[in-house]
Image: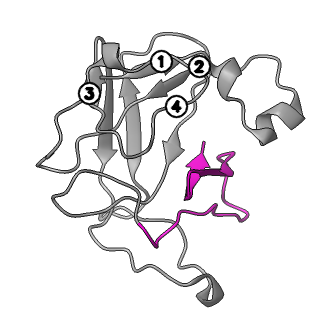
């Protein structure tokens, strides 16, 4: 199931400080990356629409109604994690060069959307945030995507 929430309820501190006039709509989708889900998908009717998004551990479908979130260009299968003191090797890259691409199909509105990204487990268990590895913003002259780091539970999430 996909979860759509009014974005006004989910503005983070960065968005509130900027005082944006039109808030993005929030659609929560998870693309199918893991072949086995040990916990069945939670039906959309069981999720109360409240002022908080569901936990990152909840199994969510990549498709609901006319919306579908697809990974058009997969990331490289391995990206060595670094300790913060080691510095960064840069962004996660695609096998063909460039970077991974995620596309939301079926969205016909003109309202901007937000995407939350976090580092998850990479085994056959249900997707959940990794206990040690955390995502972080990439900065530099060639970075054009606006992003914010946000803590959700104990997990650092990158919002773009």
Residue 19: give x, y in percent of width and height.
87, 27
Sequence-earlier tag: 1 or 4: 1
Q: How is the image coloured?
A: one colour
Q: Which mark is residue 25?
A: 2
Check the image and name the residue furthest to the bottom. Answer: 86
Indicate yes or no whether the magenta region holds residue 32: no
The crowd level at tag 3 (other Cα within 10 Å; few <14, some 14-19, many 20+) is: some
Real-space CA distance between mark 1 and mark 2, rounded to the nearest whole angstrom: 8 Å
Front of the two marks 2 and 3: 3
Q: Secondary structure at mark 4?
A: loop
Highlighted range, magenta: 131-160
Front of the two marks 1 and 3: 3
- Locate the N terminus by quadrant: top left
Q: Which mark is residue 53?
A: 4
- Residue at 45% across, 18% down: 48
Sequence-earlier tag: 2 or 3: 2
- Residue at 62% across, 82% down: 84
Q: Secondary structure at mark 3?
A: loop
Residue underneath mark 1: 4
Mark 2 in CB contact with mark 3 (< 8 angstroms): no
Locate residue 151 relative to residue 104 in the image: left or right: right
Residue underneath mark 3: 42
């Amino acid at each position: 199931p996909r979860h759509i929430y009014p974005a006004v309820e989910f503005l983070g501190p960065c968005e509130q400080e900027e005082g944006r006039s039109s808030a993005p709509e929030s659609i929560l989708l998870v693309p199918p990356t893991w072949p086995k889900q040990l916990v069945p998908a939670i039906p959309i009717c069981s999720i109360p629409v409240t002022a908080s998004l569901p936990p990152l551990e909840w199994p969510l479908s990549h498709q609901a109604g006319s919306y579908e979130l697809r990974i058009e260009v997969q990331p490289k299968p391995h990206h060595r994690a670094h300790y913060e003191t080691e510095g960064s090797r840069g962004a996660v890259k695609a096998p063909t060069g460039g970077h991974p691409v995620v596309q939301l199909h079926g969205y016909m509105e003109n309202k901007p959307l937000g995407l939350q990204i976090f580092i998850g487990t990479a085994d056959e268990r249900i997707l959940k945030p990794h206990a040690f590895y955390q995502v972080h913003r990439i900065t530099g002259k060639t970075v054009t995507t606006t992003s914010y780091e946000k803590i959700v539970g104990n997990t650092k999430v990158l919002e773009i």
